[in-house]
Image: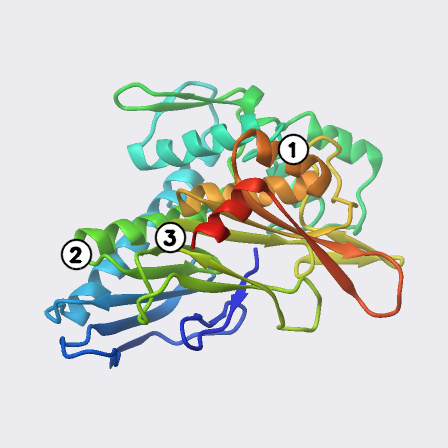
């Protein structure tokens, strides 16, 4: 996942790959007119192995920054308790560790993540798949260091036989909801949806505190509500999918939507001059090979945007655009233009994406 933007007169700066120290500050935002100017509350810190950033407008002037910070930290702790694959005590880790095929009760929060993932899995031709863990580990993009950068055909086939979200994972919406494995070794890997889920939970926390205008970001996944400090739609820059640069390829205007970008250009391995990206094709079990370098999705929630960005990058612009049109998704594909000495890119937008930009 990667996204980048710059804040200047309505644009917000995200340096998602840079380390952050926890920061709490309240800044005055000067707006024209005689009414008291709203304050801008800025919070940032570390979570989920990356950083978070929050910008919120305090129109009443009576928010307690320390109370807001405490609520944010409590929400992030709850998110990790549910959805962190890196915390062995989290709910998802405990489910993965179960040596049973019996249905087990899970929390409503965990069930909501699985239900959203099932929706995207079904609509993305199976390309979004929470059970790809064996393949992720096989290619060395998980916690394991592989013996060889490129697995054998036999190893890939064996891993493929153990995955397939619709076949190996069953969610039942009872009270409480239950989740069931088809095989005791089935595991759930939430990296492509957990950040979006966390962003949505933070947005719910801010809304509960009475904050109507905010931008929440975790590792490049965003949720925006209302307007920015200048009283306009939030403006987010999409990073050019090119190694060694921090340039902005396109700026989008966003209000009351989740946004996520997935790219193939930061997390990869090389072997014998070939680059293998961390985005895997769920059908072949191998890294994608098409020319689509980046996908940005606008959706009603950051969780769905997060999942769809991964799924549509795996599909590529050609197949992905048809899926986006079928499900009325707001998507911007950035493709590499092959040939030439200088890297060049072209963008392809879904009808919904173009309509959203025209309406802002």
**Label 3 close to label 1 by CB (< 8 Å):** no
Give SS at disc 2.
loop
Residue drawn 70% across and 35% down?
A: 319
- The residue indicated by pointer 1 is 322
Earlier sequence position, callout 2 versus callout 1: 2
Mark 2–mark 1 distance (CA, rounded to whole Å) = 40 Å
* Residue 349 in picture, x, y percent from top left: 62, 47
Q: Is residue 116 above or below residue 54?
A: above
Q: Name the mark on residue 212.
A: none
Camera-nearest residue between 146 and 236: 236
Please name which of the two marks, 3 or 1, marks the residue nearer to the observer.
Answer: 1
| Residue 23 screen position, x and y as percent | 32, 76
Q: Nearer the viewer, mark 2 or mark 1?
A: 1
In the image, what residue occupies the spot 61% across and 26% down? 164
Secondary structure under badge 1?
Answer: helix
278 left or right of 155 in image: left
Numbered circle sitting on residue 209: 2
Residue 186 appears in the picture as rendered = no
Report the front residue among 42 and 172: 42
Discs 3, 2 touching: Cβ within 8 Å: no
Check disc 3: other Cα within 10 Å, few if <14, some if 14-19, many if 20+. Answer: many
Distance from label 3 to label 1 (Cα)? 28 Å
Residue located beneath label 3 in the image: 199
**Which residue lies most toward the left here?**
62
Foreground residue, 100 or 180? 180
Task: Tell me the residue at 60%/39% (across/down).
Answer: 311
Query: Quick one: 269 or 317, which is closer to the camera?
Result: 317
Which numbered disc, 3 or 1, marks the residue that appears first in the sequence? 3
């Amino acid at each position: 996942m990667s996204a980048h933007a710059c804040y200047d007169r309505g644009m917000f700066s995200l340096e998602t790959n840079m380390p952050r120290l926890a920061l709490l500050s309240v800044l005055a935002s000067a707006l024209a007119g005689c009414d008291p100017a709203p304050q801008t509350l800025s919070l940032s810190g570390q979570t989920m192995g990356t950083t978070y950033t929050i910008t919120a407008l305090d129109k009443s002037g009576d928010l307690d920054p320390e109370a807001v910070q405490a609520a944010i930290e409590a929400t992030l702790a709850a998110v990790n308790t549910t959805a962190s694959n890196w915390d062995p005590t989290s709910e998802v880790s405990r489910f993965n560790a179960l040596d049973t095929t019996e249905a087990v009760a899970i929390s409503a929060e965990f069930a909501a993540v699985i239900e959203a993932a099932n929706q995207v899995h079904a609509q993305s031709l199976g390309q979004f798949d929470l059970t790809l863990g064996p393949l992720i580990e096989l290619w060395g993009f998980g916690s394991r260091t592989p013996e060889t950068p490129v697995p054998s055909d036999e190893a890939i086939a064996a891993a493929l036989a153990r995955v397939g979200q619709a076949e190996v994972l069953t969610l039942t919406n009872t009270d409480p909801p239950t989740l069931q494995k088809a095989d005791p070794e089935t595991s759930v890997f939430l990296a492509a949806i957990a950040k979006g889920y966390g962003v949505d939970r933070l947005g719910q926390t801010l809304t509960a505190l009475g904050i109507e205008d905010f931008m929440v970001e975790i590792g490049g996944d965003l949720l925006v509500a209302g307007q920015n400090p200048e009283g306009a739609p939030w403006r987010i820059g999409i990073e050019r999918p090119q190694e060694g640069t921090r340039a902005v390829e396109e700026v989008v205007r966003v209000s009351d939507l989740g946004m996520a970008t997935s790219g193939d250009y930061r997390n990869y391995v090389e072997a014998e001059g070939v680059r293998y990206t961390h985005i895997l094709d769920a059908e072949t079990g191998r890294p994608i090979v098409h020319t689509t370098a980046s996908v940005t999705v606008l959706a009603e929630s950051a969780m769905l945007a997060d999942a769809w960005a991964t799924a549509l990058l795996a599909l590529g612009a050609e197949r992905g655009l048809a899926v986006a049109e079928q499900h009325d998704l707001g998507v911007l594909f950035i493709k590499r233009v092959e040939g030439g000495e200088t890297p060049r890119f072209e963008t392809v937008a879904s009808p919904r994406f173009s309509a959203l930009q025209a309406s802002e």
